[in-house]
Image: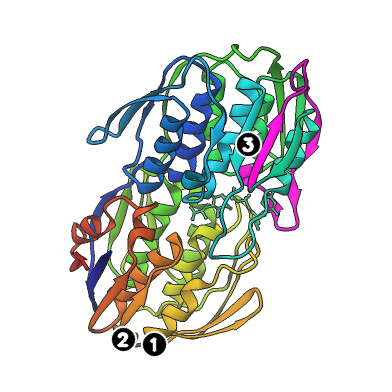
Amino acid sequence: MDVFVVEGNATISGSVGIVGAKNSVLPILAASLLTSEPLELENVPALADVATMLGILSELGSDVQRDVAKARLSICSAATIEPTAPWELVRKMRASFEVLGPLLGRTGRARVSFPGGCVFGLRPVDVHLKGLVALGANVRQEGGYVIAEAPRGGLRGAEIFLGTPFGSSVGATRNVMMAAVLAHGRTVLQGAACEPEIVDLTECLVKMGARIEGAGSPTIEIEGAGDRAALGGASHRVIPDRIEAGTFLVAGALLDGRVRVEGCRPGHLASLCDAFSRAGVALERGEDWLEVQPRGGEPLRPTDVTTQPYPGFPTDLQAQWMALMCRAEGVSVVTERIYSDRYMHLAELLRLGARIRREGATAVVEGTPTLSGASVMASDLRASAALVLAALAASGETEIHRVYHIDRGYERIEERFRGLGATIRREQR
Ligand code: EPZ
């Protein structure tokens, strides 16, 4: 397994280009199942999760032509699809569950493995299934699989509430939307997720011929085509990855360097920019870039964050923010409201000398002037990114094990940090 060896006390500066959003390209790839015509995508990141999704789609008969160097791909689903997504592939990545909606919409049936467990708590799919049942599907579980069948006359539009105790569900909004676009009649999604990745998927679906209004708001209205062959091919450029951009900006703040993220959407990072201003971190911004400024000797102020659905502070930046607060001058409170247990990074940050106490959904972070290098274990994708940041800030050398977690959602992260002046190398172990 690969290991990152990270030299601490790093200073970084310069520009880094932001790649396409993992959490947008994955559902858009699933949406290619809704038509037998090719979907041409640009700004496709070279991530392990993208490879996993392409593996599942190939298994479902899709033809993929890809130019990784140009971040382009063309994908065309089979004229007739055997709609089964096997456990061997689905277990690797939860997002693969989002082939369920498009398979059901396009073929009238689907057999998709229940998504595997997750390191940060239970991640049920009850709202996904509730939405499909509301569209008229018969949904049952058998042998670890979800089996969904549309009624003889096809799916029918409905009014569906998609909220969960933790706010709206991003995945359920997408899964149900991708089934509803081919249903008969109108669907109204209430309590829909508002993330930019929902808007990006919607823009792609509309280019394919779907009729959707309200994406980005809690109420989305879909005029179902009522015909499984209604959607066509399209060309679409995936939006930049706001979480990757946020990760590099937090790294710049943590290491007190001038770091510019280019090719991003500053408007997607309003809550992070707000947290930075409360922490005493100055930013400059342009139309498609953000640049964190050195503090010039000013301290990093302790700053509380609570994760919330978009446009609130993203749960996917919680671990990275915690790493930053390890160096603040004072005590910060980080509260995770989206997942019941997204604190896998705590134990590993403690190994680097951080002072963090957990109280249920809240972590109390006491900033300390020194973190010190150690061997640590990556766990979930964003926790692993936080360990890279903390290792760069720690004194001495840090080894990060199981970096395949990072490769799932960050493209060549060690090369790109080296491009900013860090000393970090990947070793085969
Ligand atoms: C998406 O996951 C993202 N993944 C996650 O990013 C992100 O953390 C999450 O949205 C929240 O923003 C992709 O887009 C591929 P949810 P998703 O359904 O759709 C509960 C990363 O690091 N819930 O919005 O699975 C659920 O347990 C990943 O890039 C139900 O209760 O998240 C959670 O507590 C990690 N019932 C909350 O809702 C359901 O049926 C939000 O989950 C569905 C979800």
Q: Secondary structure at mark 3?
A: helix
Which residue is located at x 56 percent, y 65 percent? 120
Q: Is residue 374 left or right of residue 152?
A: left
Amino acid type of the residue that numbered disc 1 sits on in the rendered structure: Gly
* The label number, if any, that marks residue 372 in the structure image: 2
Of the image marks 1 and 2, the number of the one nearer the N terminus = 1
Q: Position of residue 207 (x, y in %)?
A: 52, 19
Amino acid type of the residue that numbered disc 3 sits on in the rendered structure: Asn
- Place residue 62 in its image quadrant: top left
Please give the range of residues in magenta. Answer: 144-171
Instruction: Answer whether labels 3 and 1 touch (C-beta < 8 Å).
Output: no
Which residue is located at x 29 percent, y 29 percent? 66
* The label number, if any, that marks residue 353 in the structure image: 1
Categorize mark 2 by other alpha carbons within 10 Å: few (<14), some (14-19), many (20+).
many
Q: Which is in the foreground here, disc 3 or disc 2?
A: 3
Q: Position of residue 367 (x, y in %)?
A: 45, 84
- Place residue 280 in its image quadrant: bottom left
- Marks 3/2: CA distance? 44 Å
Q: Which residue is mark 3?
A: 175
Instruction: Answer whether labels 1 and 2 touch (C-beta < 8 Å).
Output: yes
Q: Position of residue 252 (x, y in %)?
A: 32, 65
In this rendered view, identify the residue nearer to me: 266 or 309: 309
Q: Secondary structure at mark 2?
A: loop
Q: Secondary structure at mark 1?
A: loop
Amino acid type of the residue that numbered disc 2 sits on in the rendered structure: Ser
Of the image marks 3 and 1, the number of the one nearer the N terminus = 3
